[in-house]
Amino acid sequence: MPLEPQLKSQIKLQRCCVSCRKIAPKSEFWRVVRLHSDSPEASATNPEIGLDKGMGRSAYICPNLQCLQQAQKKNRLGRSLHAQIPPQIFELLKARLEVVP
């Protein structure tokens, strides 16, 4: 049964942090994406990983140091995205933490 139009506008998209499992609106998280690639060379061992934008398998993480460290230590982003996450992605996310007020 379809939702009434006024109810649809009130629904907030909820996501879950891969590290702490917190559920919140997706605007509160950072999005890490394994970008879709048509080339056969792109595989789980050599994926393209992006931040925030793009189509493909994605995972969400809280913008705090504890979640970021735990996700890196326990390879939670890698397991969620079915890919190896390069250390540069974690460095970029840590740099974002220093910029965020």
Image (spheres, grey):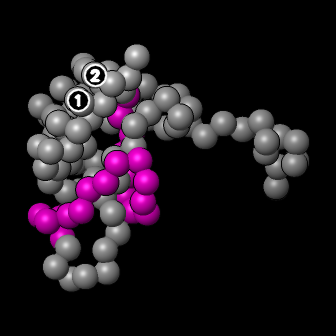
Q: Is residue 3 visible in the rendered structure shown here?
A: yes
Q: Amino acid at mark 2?
A: Glu
Where does label 2 land, which residue?
98
Q: Is residue 20 visible in the rendered structure shown here?
A: no
Residue closer to the observer: 31 or 99: 99
Residue contact at pointers 1 and 2, CB within 8 angstroms = yes
Q: Which quarter of the rendering shows the C terminus?
A: top left
- Is 82 on the left-hand or right-hand side of 1? left
Residue 87 placement (x, y as % from top left): 11, 43
- Is 1 on the left-hand or right-hand side of 88? right
Q: Which quarter of the rendering shows the N terminus?
A: bottom right
Residue 65 placement (x, y as % from top left): 25, 21
| Callout 1 secondary element | helix
How far apart, in angstroms, are the residues tagged by discs 1 and 2? 7 Å
Residue 12 placement (x, y as % from top left): 66, 36
- Is 50 on the left-hand or right-hand side of 14? left
Residue 6: mark: none
Where does label 1 land, which residue?
94
At a point 18% along the width and 71% down the height, the residue shown is 43
Q: What range of the chain is rendered magenta?
A: 43-62
Q: Nearer the viewer, mark 1 or mark 2?
A: 2
Structural crowding at the residue carrying mark 1, measured as other residues with C-alpha within 10 Å and reported as few (<14), some (14–19) or many (≥20)? some
81 lies above or below 27 = below
| Callout 2 secondary element | helix
